Image (spheres, rainbow, N blue to C red):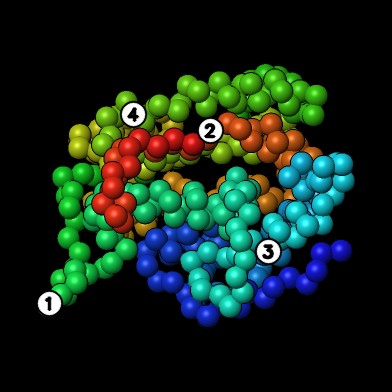
Amino acid sequence: MPREQPQFKIIRIRGAYRHRATRAAVLTAILQRKLLVDDMQRNFDDLRKRWHAVLQSLAESNWKPLLDAEGDLSTRNLQFMRDCPPFSVVTADKRRTCNRDRICPFCYARRNVMRPFVRMERVLYGPNSNSFRVAGPGSKALPVLRPDLTLIAFRLTLKNGTAWLKTKLTPKTLPDHWEAAKDYIRRNRQYERGFEPEYSSSQIHLCPKPDRIELRRSGIMLVKIAPEKVVATLKRQGMQAIALKPCKKSLFEATTFAFRYPEDIFSKGTNPVMRARLLEIMSSTRLKSWCGIVKDEDGDAKDTYEE
């Protein structure tokens, strides 16, 4: 049996918008309740209990990352993922991250919410974007370097997904449904670039349903062209879309709108075996993309990025 779980007692709650975005996008989505500062320890404890339940179902479904070389359950691998540290807070316990961001809510927050937020923040505020104010006398608010850009956030959930195949999703038909999902991914990977954004970050998430694979595509863009036209075009195609002025608060709203954790993954109605097989079959497929050039903390330019 796994050893006793580290407590991860919260010492400090990080207050920057980038950290608030991770909590709003993940904790709120999964726990389905308002986040109060005084309840943050309970929130993270409850999230970990749910993560442990999902891991247990994956273990019972023989998810490969939890198996050893002989194909048996590895208690070491299981414990390693159970101990994935929380995000957006400082804790007494320190652990390594499991880096399974396609399902782990803790790594999802760090990689799928925090990472695009920070990239966009550096575009708007420069390499020292983690600050709120300019250092020195007067302590002025950090200025927006690109007020000419408009922030666009969009999302679309295809609940019917691969249902057009007319075959129920089973382990036997999973390859067919996966090919249909990959075709959608290929066709939409470059979609937002049609709006000629200077910067864009998009993601595609998949969730197994009883008879299909549900697909969700979402992203954020910084565009120069008329934002109302972009939003209107997105909405005509069935998407939810919002346009916001470029600032930290708007970036918080856009990120939590677009990159909310797909909570159906944690649903008790999700078939655990199909969830495990789908995670395995899509492990090498690129589901995230970034377009743009951003300077890091050292001032080095980072070119177009995709994964």
> Disc 3 marks which amino acid?
Asp
Q: Choose between 161 and 3: the one closer to the eye.
A: 3
In this picture, residue 10 sits left or right of residue 194 = right
List the residue tagged with mark 2. Answer: 286
Report the residue at 75% width, 54% height from top. Answer: 77
Residue 253 shows which numbered tag?
A: none
Residue 193 shows which numbered tag?
A: 4
Give the mark nearer the N terminus: 4 vs 3.
Answer: 3
In this picture, residue 22 sits left or right of residue 63 = left
Report the residue at 53% width, 80% height from top. Answer: 11
Q: Is residue 86 above or below residue 179?
A: below
Q: Residues within 10 Å of mark 3 (few under 14, many from 20)?
A: many
> Can residue 243 be spotted in the picture?
no
Give the mark nearer the N terminus: 4 vs 1.
Answer: 1
Tag 4's secondary structure?
helix
Residue 99: x %, y % from top left = 60, 51
